[in-house]
Structure formats: structure tokens, C-alpha cells
Image (cartoon, rainbow, N blue to C red):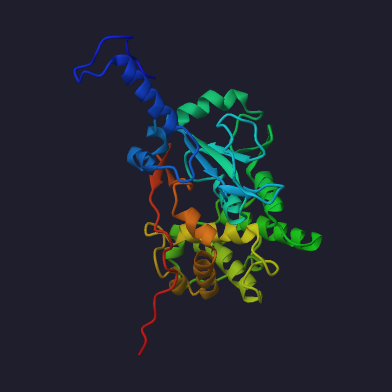
Amino acid sequence: GINAEYGGTLDSGMPKLALLFSLAALATASTSFSPNPDIAHLYTAKSFGNVQATTVRVERLPSRFTVNRFGERVPVLRPADDAVTPLIHLKYMALRGLADLPAMILECGGLPYRATYFSRVDFQAIKPKLEFGRLPVLEVEGDEIAQSNAIVRYIADKAGMAGGTAKERARVDGVYETLRDLFVSHGVWGKAFDVQALQHGENQERLHFRHTSNRGNYTPFQKAFSALQTFEELLAGSSSGYLVGSNLTYVDLALWQKLHEMGQPDMLGEGWADRLRVPRLGAFCSRLYQEKQELASFVGSGRRMPRIKRIDNDYVYFEDMPIPEPSVPKLEL
């Protein structure tokens, strides 16, 4: 808060009251919703635990103008920051995590939305008001939806990215659950996907998920590589280049998210698809970034929170390369 006495002047000659109003205006501006917020302060803080009470607020409105019922092009009135609006409002902490995929779907689906990414201090203040005391939540016209996967499916359905038919939606759901088993947390194996394990063990037997069992004895490399092999094969059987059907769905974005992180310099680095001999995954990762302008815009903006690693009971921020090249460029002879 601002601690200043009323009246008097500072050494600069500016009245204290004027300074008070000036700082208050700056504070209000810094906490307003923005289409491309400056998140440099997060990287400067180096970790989520070090971030002071500076919450990041995002607002994505596809157009500043609309056509009214008379056919006239008129400006869209921006809702007040505290108004209950039809805009979807995503809420999470100021780090990349369970809200990253929902935000990615909102962006690629072209849905107008707001997002609030709380600092630790601000989160503790709102925690008692949350139904389950956890984030993320999605506010929809005053009601809140909890749990990240419920949020993913709700947004994907609204964006038309959940599958075109009931059968296709079930297929997308099944592939997404398989992805979560392999890349997030397996029910028996625990953390199955260990990126560091992929740096060693190239000569080990490579297994598809169907060739494993829950109680089998596998090396960390085999568990991690089974995720890549499974999705490499799914793409091999696709005529569209997408995991399910002929259009982009949320499971494509979920896979892209994992591959993009895996290719970062402090992970596997550039050329990972060539080294691991998964060319379809490499091509998929590059193609989505190149063809989906909304994805490229989101990845390079302040609307996407920093990548993190959990170190010493804190979330440490890491900067991204926009698109680490999965394949080594071939020399033309």
C-alpha cells in the first residue's frame, strides 16, 4: 500500500497529495486487464515464491468493433474490471501449470476471455472464497467451474475443439486420458515421463504403451519413450496430421504443449526428434506452430505465464525459446 501523509511537499516540490493520486493511478493501471501484459517482473523475481503482490490480468477481445442491428460498425464497449460479464474468466496462479492448456484452447478457439494469474499473496487472500480452495477455476457469468480437466473440456466444447460427433468426442477424450497417463502421472508407475531419462538409453528396447503392463519392470527410458512411441504411431495412422479427425482438437494442443516444453534448451534441446527417431512428432510440433497463428501469438506474448520447475519447495521460472527446432536442418548438396 501507499504510506504518505496528507499535505506538505517532497524535495521535488510535488505535493504529497498529488503524488498519492499519481501512484494510485499507476497501481490501478498495473492491475488492469491487458491484451499483452508485461510479465518481466516475474522473470526478475526468478520464482513464484519471490513474486510480490503483483497479480497479472489478461484480457483477450478478438475485435474492437462489432456490427449492430442496423448494420453499423460500432466499437465494442470494454466491460469494467469488476463487472460480471459473459466473458469466460480463467483464474490461476502466476505460473505455467494447470491453466496453460485451457488458455491455449481459448486462444486457438478464438474465444474472448479474461484471465487472472494471482501472486502468492493475492491467492492466499482469495483462497477462503473458493468453493474447494484450489485453482484453477473458470468463472462463467458469475458461476465457477473447478478442476482443470473439467475446465479443459468445457472450453473445448465451446470452442468447437472437442470433436465433431459423439463418437469423435469420445475418441478425443480417450486419447487425452492416455496422454495424461503417459505424460503426467500413471496410476501405478507414478511419474512415467522423465525427460532426463530420454537423454540416455537410446540402445534400449523401445516399447509402445500397449506392449507394457502396469506391473511390468521397465527402465525410466522405456517408460518415457513409450509416450513418444504411442503418439508417433497415432500420427502415422492419421491422414489429416491431427490425432483425431480432420480438425484441431484439444488433445492436439495438449500434445503440442508437452513436446514444446520437451524441446527447450534445458530439456532435450533442438534436434530432439531426430535424435529419438520420432520424425512425425517433430513435424507435428513444427507444423502446428507455423500454421496456427493464434498459437504462435499466444506463445510469444505476456498472456502465457512462465515455464516452471519445482526446486527447493518453490516454482522457479524459466524462459522459453519460442519454437525449438525438433529436427536438425538438412544440408542441401
- Name the residue at 65% across, 60% down: 249
Image height check: is 279 above or below 255?
below
Give the quadrant of the N terminus. Answer: top left
Give the quadrant of the C terminus. Answer: bottom left
| Relative image position of residue 221 (x, y in whole percent) | 50, 63
Snapshot quadrant of residue 4: top left
Is 300 left, or right, of 190 in this rendering?
Answer: left
- Name the residue at 69% across, 50% down: 153
- Name the residue at 66% across, 77% down: 239
Q: Is residue 321 visible?
A: yes
Image height check: is 271 above or below 3?
below
Snapshot quadrant of residue 232: bottom right
Snapshot quadrant of residue 77: top right
Q: Can residue 214 be seen in this view?
A: no
Number of dots carrying numbers: 0
Instruction: Work out which residue is located at the far left of the displayed protein and give it.
Output: 11
| Relative image position of residue 157 (x, y in whole percent) | 71, 52
Instruction: Work out which residue is located at the far right of the displayed protein and give it.
Output: 166
Q: Nearer the viewer, residue 316 or 223?
A: 316
Q: Which of 293 and 74 is in front in this view?
A: 74
Image height check: is 65 above or below 92?
below
Q: Nearer the viewer, residue 222 or 38?
A: 38
Q: Which of 27 and 274 is in front in this view?
A: 27
Is 298 left, or right, of 244 in this rendering?
Answer: left
| Relative image position of residue 67 (x, y in whole percent) | 65, 50
| Relative image position of residue 112 (x, y in whole percent) | 61, 47
